[in-house]
Amino acid sequence: MQSNIEPSSQKELLDEVLQGSPTVIPGQPTHTRKLYLESYGCQMNFSDSEIVASILSEAGFTTTREEEEADLILLNTCAIRENAEQRVRARLRQFKQAKESRPHLVVGVLGCMAERLKESLLEQEKLVDMVVGPDAYRDIPNLVEQVNGGQKAVNVLLSREETYAEISPVRLDANGVTAFISIMRGCDNMCSFCVVPFTRGRERSRDPESIVREAHELFDAGYREVTLLGQNVDSYKWNIDNKGVVKDESQPVVRFAELIDRVAHVNPDMRVRFSTSHPKDMTDDVLEVMAKHENVCKYIHLPVQSGNSDVLKRMNRGYTREWYFNRIEAIHRIMPDCATSTDIIAGFCGETEEEHQDTLSLMELMRYDMAYMFAYSERPRTLAQRKFEDDVPQEVKSRRLHEIMAVQKVNAAERTKSYVGRTFRVLVEGTSKKKEDQYFGRTTYNTVVVFPKEDALPSTYVNVYVHDCTPVTLIGTITKNQPES
Ligand code: SAH
Ligand code: SF4
Ligand code: F3S
């Protein structure tokens, strides 16, 4: 996913999750119970929180931005790295204290950490009242009643079918311009470092008709950009005759390229993005569909993880350095102007200095617009934890991570600079955080642009001439000239 939003501060996180005013469900009495929901981790989790808010609104809850007035506090958690869990634990301890003065307050943990730790969060750690895994959100209203009845409640059953397909998410990020649509759940890949297959279960795709319907509804509600989400969108597949299950490849199947095509047809003014692509599965037909539609953004997040084929083998990623280059060449052949980004892990098990140098050289060659970079963090139950020793010392991981970040910083600044002097079609997302009289928006390449508002409106497109930049942001003015892209 455009992945792993790790907000640098609590404030930023709350802003991200609870932008806009609290959701008030029409027809509900004003004394309804209040839900305070905080999300961590990837976009998938943020998208799931919108499903949870929807399920709980049916049960009479309204969402609030004030944790002090909440009857129910839910943390939608991430387990991808040790520090993600530590942050959640610290937050749970705060809520545990709050419960001492508010005995009726119910606190629950959702998401990947709930799935990973299960009952132990209730029993050993005694931090919460309720633990709910990613496939059990429909059960939350019952579980809350169970807690109100004096019991602790847990449901961490994973499912092979659940996609929450027909649930209309309550849009918590109320910018009214951009939205996520979950197109699949789970992951079958078993990259050796990764906890996701254990926390999210088996891969399953969502009915394409429900996806297209959701995109139409968003367009009608004024949204102008959707991001299709999955851990590996390239393996999206839906058997038309068989409610999704693909048993026989000769039956009619909707694959990712066709899904993009269908969503792109919703309206030419609806931008389409997606995340995450997998280098081993990304086929040329996906790239061709991207090239065909102007409204499919020319930006691909293609996590490489390491620039060395032996490390990639230990990571069980299913491709080599050479294959990754082949995929990047295909992107540039089919869409010469496409921007790219990646994820990198520094200091994976057994990583030598030479192997690390291969990652640096790959980064130099790729010139990514953006990268998410992490130090390896061993996760319980993963293949790497069972098979390999986490033998790169912390200070070496840190130093390698900083070297990778230094290369990326230079590359990103150069990429940003290369857009100066050009005119872009920009979707206006809202008022700039720094300047009240300026808007911010994005180019097709996902680069943020700020510009004076003039008489433009959010959720519309403007042509912006870029005359300057900071290392990560473009600075421009609205122009009548036609955009190059
Ligand atoms: N499905 C996506 C990634 C999901 S997790 C993909 O396959 O690319 C997002 C990123 O977190 C990964 O790409 C990886 O770079 C990082 N990550 C996952 N497990 C990690 C671990 N144990 N330690 C450090 N980083 C990790
Ligand atoms: Fe994890 Fe690999 Fe699946 Fe991504 S593709 S979620 S890294 S197992
Ligand atoms: Fe996402 Fe974190 Fe789970 S990255 S899938 S919330 S482990």
Image (cartoon, helix red, strand yellow):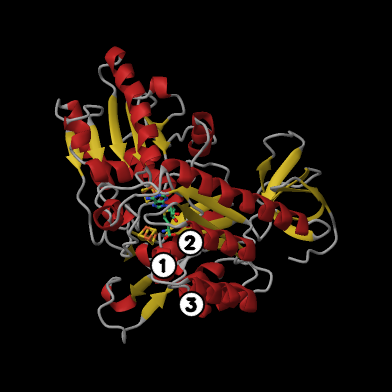
Indicate the secondary structure of the residue bearing disc 2: helix
**Callout 2–callout 3 Cβ contact below 8 Å:** no
- Residue type at mark 2 is Glu
Indicate the secondary structure of the residue bearing disc 3: loop
Front residue (pair 295, 218): 295
Q: Kindly identify which residue carries mark 2.
A: 355
| Badge number at residue 310 | 1
Image vertical order of residue 425 relative to residue 245, above or below:
above
| Front disc: 1 or 3 | 1
**Callout 1–callout 2 Cβ contact below 8 Å:** yes
* Rendered location of residue 414, percent (x, y): 73, 56
- Residue type at mark 1 is Asp
**Label located before the other in sequence (2 or 3):** 3
Is 251 on the left or on the right of 447, as rendered?
left
Which residue: 48% across, 52% down? 3
Q: Kindly identify which residue carries mark 3.
A: 283
Q: Residue pushed farthest front? A: 353
Q: Residue pushed farthest bottom? A: 250
Q: Quadrant of residue 91?
A: top left
